[in-house]
Amino acid sequence: MARYIFYTLVAFLLYKLIFDFIIPIFITTKKMKQQFNQARQQMEEQYKQQNGDHAPHENKVNTHGSSSKIGEYIDFEEIRK
């Protein structure tokens, strides 16, 4: 008889744990991820509107691969008189 009461109690506690703790945490986490993604998308759209529809990584200036050379690069240690 005590064995059935124990198993019933364990089953009840597992039920409460799953449906009152684990599932609500899962649902809340999923909603928060969606909200963060929406906020990020809104910020990206605002940035694009303010900066002429360019993504942030497109505004970087490429100084190393420029076709016009001003001068030749010389290491500081190589300059001697």
Image (cartoon, rainbow, N blue to C red):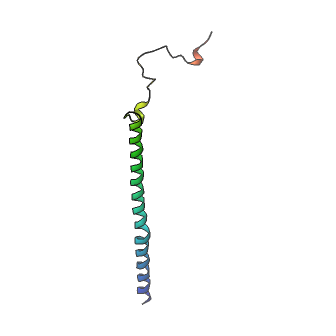
Q: Nearer the viewer, residue 9 or 24?
A: 24
Q: Is residue 62 above or below residue 48?
A: above
Seen in the picture, residue 74 relative to 7 is either above or below; the reply is above
Q: Residue 40: x and y, percent?
A: 41, 46
Task: State the residue at coordinates (58%, 18%).
Answer: 76
In the current view of this chain or complex, which residue is farthest to the top? Answer: 81
User: Going 40% across and 58% down the picture, which residue do you hit?
Assistant: 31
Q: Is residue 15 above or below residue 54?
A: below
Image quarter of residue 33: bottom left
Residue 79 rendering spot, x and y as whole percentages: 59, 13
Image quadrant for the C terminus? Answer: top right
In this orientation, which residue lies closer to the viewer: 76 or 39? 39
Which one is nearer the viewer's eye here, 70 or 13? Answer: 70
Image quadrant occupied by the N terminus: bottom left
* Residue that sits furthest to the bottom in the current view: 1
**How far across and down, in percent of the image, does residue 52 sit?**
38, 33
